[in-house]
Structure formats: structure tokens, C-alpha cells
Image (cartoon, rainbow, N blue to C red):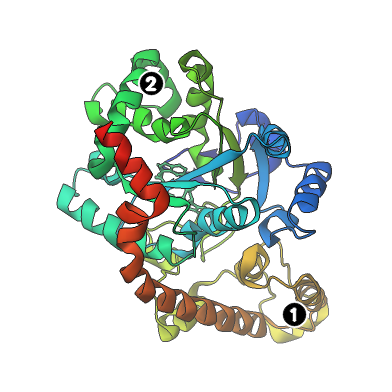
Amino acid sequence: MPDEFTVTPWEVKGKVDYDKLIIQFGTQKITEELKHKIKNLTGGELHVMLRRNIFFSHRDLDLVIEDYEKGKGFFLYTGRAPSLGMHIGHLIPFIFTKWLQDKFKVNVYIEVTDDEKFLRNQEYTLDQTRSWAYDNILDIIAVGFDPDRTFIFQDTEYIRNMYPIAIKIAKKLTFSEIRATFGLETSSNIGIIFYPALQIAPTMFEKKRCLIPAGIDQDPYWRLQRDIAESLGYYKAAQIHSKFLPPLTGPEGKMSSSNPETAIYLSDDPKTVEKKIMKYAFSGGQPTIELHRKYGGNPEIDVAFQWLYYFFEEDDNKIKKIEEDYRSGKMLTGELKQILIEKLNDFLEEHRRKREEAKKLLHVFKYDGKLASEMWQKVHE
Ligand code: TYM
């Protein structure tokens, strides 16, 4: 029987069966044993997204840990294709990457693909994707990365240092491999055919093992990287993959920028958040209060509960209580939604405050910080 879901870098359809996806993509489940190892290295603390298996799958994370223990170190790499406004789902890999950076004190490279976005969409101009890059970078800085150890770069600006690496990668990959991996058509523009070399290039910014925290939709790029990295004298990139924050409208697919009612944007004001959650958030509750009290709600499909579970309610005891009360019918859908609205608005208010401060730091992360200036120096070597 064909799978009822699809996961590609461009679309996520249906209710994703993450266990099946691990088999389909040939990745490894993050075991309790591996989590235990990480916990021992991070001062006895595990990030909520690891505790709750939001980051659920990996490749070579065990080797990254080994390298770290042996003192060889590693580095982190993640990215973003800029669009008009980020939504809260986009923050998942960045929040988690920041936690890893805090705990392991490692370099982080963040690629902002103004080229990818331009090439993929007929209707967008390069001026547009570049201005969205500026805008999205502020949201990324607001997450709180270490300015000495983080380099945020836009492809169209940093290309001079990436190009020599990218053409070595490109020479190892054939058109038919790219076509088969990404399902391209012969009518695809040639920029899109070359683009994977640019997404792979940052995995070779250092001669250490690279760990990529990202949604599992980006995995096809890393499979290609792993086929060729060693022949170029680099490590196969390691990954830690996250699940998708479900759209407001139900447990299927992923929150997507192209559908405003499915998403909460980082710029949504408190009234908009309240309106969207009340109107659109898919409920696992019963149609009437009487039935709800009798049969209870289903947290597995309830989007408000799922969002709290992903990261808005970090306290394990509190989330357990909410789950029990909702399942038993003690807590109503409206009450559950109210908890989420408050959490979301607090989070967004704080995010926007940090985003204002980020304006002053933009230059540091892109050009003048310790890592950023080292990376720009390479352009002149
Ligand atoms: P983009 O801009 O589509 O997505 C940025 C990151 O957000 C993740 N993501 C989500 N995670 C959880 N729930 C969601 N609903 C959700 N929607 C998106 C994505 O998996 C991704 O990690 N080609 C890339 C840009 C890129 C990149 C990278 C991403 C360049 N280099 C290295 C990750 C790592 C893109 O289009 O991302």
C-alpha cells in the first residue's frame, strides 16, 4: 500500500508517520541511551525538544558525541530560505541549535538562501528575497546565538568563499542524481539544478564533523553530501532531525507560510493570535460541553495541545496535568486554547523585544563578530 504522506523539501502532505520515515530515509531513531549520553554532557539537562522526541531522528549523532568527548570538537550548521515573515515552526531548529551551542560552545553557521528562494519562485525578484533575508536574519539573531561563535551569511553575498567549495561538490554530482533526489523536471531552470551544491558547501566550512539540526524535510541534501564528502576530504555530515510543528488547521502536513490561516507569524499581534487560535486551531474536543465532560478530548490530534507539547509548555509536570485534564474532560477546548494564547503572546512579545535589539547586532553576526570576520578573511586568502 502506498504511504499516505509525503515529505520533500517543498511539501509535507498527510499525517506523517515518523517511524516509517526513519525507515524510508534510512536514518536512526534517537535512543534513550543516546539521550542519556547527551544529558551527562550537558550538565544533567536535556532540552524539551529532545525530552519529548520533537528531535527524533539522526545520523552519526553518536559519532559527533564521540568526537566531542575525544576533544576533536564539531560544528553546527543550519539555514533558512527567506520569506515574507517567519512563522513559529521555522524557529524550532534555531531554538534547538542555540541550545546545542550554549551547551557545547561550538561554532554555528547559518545559511540564508536568498538565491534558492529567488530561483524556486517565478514571481519573486532578487530584491525581494534579499530584503526578506535581512528581515528573517533579525528573527534568527533574536533567538540568542553567541555573537563570537556564530556566522550568519546570505548566499548572494558570501558566494566568493562558497564558490570554490561548491564547484568541487558540483563536479561530483550528476544531473540525473539531482533530478532523482529532488524530482526536478527537464524544464527546471539551471540555477535550481546547481543550488544543492550551495546548500551542501557549508558542511565543509571546517575540517571537523558538521552536525545539522533541521526539519527532516531537508534530508535529501544531506544524503547527497554523505555520498561525496569523504572523496573531497571531509566528514560525512551528521544530522539531528525534527518533526514538523503541525499547522493550526489540523494534525496533517506542516505549518506553511503560503497559507496564512495555518500559521502564527512572529509578527502576529496579541489580538490576531487570539483570533486565529480561537477560529482555526483544530480541536480534539467533543462537539458539545456535555459530550466533552463525558468522553474527554484527544490531545494527539488537538493542535493547541500539540503546540504546548512541542515547546510552549516546557514544564513536564504541567504538560502532564494539562494532558490528563483534557483527556478526562475536566479541561475544555476553550480553556486549553486560552493557555496556548497566553503562552504564545508572552513568547512573541519577548521575541519582538529581542528582535529590536537584534538590529544593533546585525553587523556583528554577518561581518564583524569573531567567527564572522574569520570567515570573511577567507575570501581574501
Ligand atoms: P526553510 O526556510 O523552508 O525552513 C527553515 C527551517 O525550518 C524547518 N521548518 C520547520 N520545522 C518544524 N516545523 C515546521 N512546520 C517547519 N517548517 C520549516 C525546516 O526544516 C528548516 O530546518 N533549503 C532550506 C534552507 C537551508 C537549510 C540549510 C535548512 C539552507 N541550508 C541547512 C536547514 C539546514 C529551506 O528552504 O528551509
Q: What element carries label 1?
A: helix
As displayed, is residue 212 above or below residue 39? above
Does label 1 point to a residue whose CB lies under 8 Å from ligand 1?
no
Secondary structure of the residue carrying tag 2 is helix
- Image coordinates of residue 40 in percent, x first then y, are 80, 51
Relative image position of residue 9 (x, y in whole percent): 44, 40
In this orientation, does residue 5 appear?
no
Q: Name the residue type under label 1.
A: His
Which corner quadrant of the image does residue 194 belong to? Answer: top left
- Residue closest to the eye, 372 or 9: 372
Residue designated by label 2: 169
Tell me the residue at 51%/61% (across/down): 247
Q: Name the residue under label 1.
A: 292
Give the class, few, some or many, for how many residues have Cα within 10 Å of label 2's Cα (few <14, many ≥20): many
State left or right for residue 328 relative to residue 47.
right
The residue under the point 71% across, 52% down is 53
Circles 2, 1 touching at the beta carbon (< 8 Å): no
| Residue located 68% across and 37% down the image | 71
Q: Where is residue 381, by image quadrant?
A: top left
Residue in the picture at 60% in, 58% down: 102
Q: x%, y% of residue 60? A: 66, 32
